[in-house]
Amino acid sequence: MRCPFCAHEDSQVKDSRPTEDNTSIRRRRQCGSCGARFTTFERVQLREITVIKTDGSRQPFDRSKIEQSVSLACRKRSVERDKIDRLVSGVQRQVETMGESEVSSLAIGEMVMDGLRQLDSVAYIRFASVYRDFSEARDFEEFASTVRGIVPE
């Protein structure tokens, strides 16, 4: 593992333990050159997944993008970090077990929305406002009324 401080190619694992949700292993490492310590996380990856964006471009699946989007939607909400991690891990597991090597970003967005709907209604609306590209206040009103179970006028 390359050291993030000095870019030396060799580091030594000092401590390993599973994360709280048992979906990855946390490793403390020490650089053999500069002596700096850093943490890495190791996760199981079942297959290489390519995400097909709405503009037709293709990118490798990146768990951190989902994690960042969900964290942003949940910002300043009383949602525990481990619940966000479980949601992201659940979406990643769904994507990897679909049996496809290519998945549309729209499908991933719907999976995230399903998870957020159950987690926090405000975070769900925040994510939907970006994901569904709300352009005016009426879009929020209509969507929020569906969250409450009220049919819009």
Image (cartoon, grey):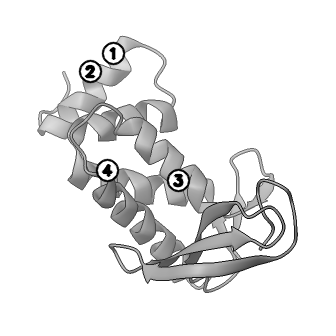
Residue 65 in the figure: left or right of residue 136: right
Q: Are marks 4 and 2 in contact (CB under 8 Å)?
A: no
Q: Amino acid at mark 3?
A: Ile
Disc on res. 138: 1
* Residue indicated by mark 3: 66
Sequence-earlier tag: 3 or 1: 3
Task: Give the amino acid type for the residue marked by disc 1 in the picture.
Answer: Arg
**Quarter of the view holding residue 46:** bottom right
Q: Which mark lies nearer to you, 4 or 3?
A: 3
Q: Percent position (x, y) of residue 117? A: 26, 49
User: Could you tell me the amino acid type at mark 2?
Assistant: Glu
In this rendering, position of residue 106 left or right of residue 119: right
Q: Which is in the foreground here, disc 3 or disc 1?
A: 3
Question: In the rendered view of the protein, which quadrant contains the N terminus?
Answer: bottom right
Q: Dot 2, how many residues are within 10 Å of its Cα: few (below 14), some (14-19), or many (20+)?
A: few
Q: Nearer the viewer, mark 2 or mark 3?
A: 3
- Badge 1 local density, few (<14 within 10 Å), some, or many (20+)? few
- Which numbered disc, 1 or 4, marks the residue closer to the eye? 4
What number is the disc on residue 141? Answer: 2
Mark 3 and mark 1 in contact? Answer it, CB < 8 Å: no
* CA–CA distance in space, label 4 to label 2: 18 Å
In the rendered image, residue 23, in percent from the top left (x then y), is placed at: 43, 78
Mark 4 Cα within 10 Å, few/some/many (few <14, many 20+)? many
Q: Examine the image and state in which quarter residue 89 appears.
A: bottom left
Question: Which disc number belongs to residue 116?
Answer: 4
On the image, the x and y values in percent for residue 149 come to: 12, 40
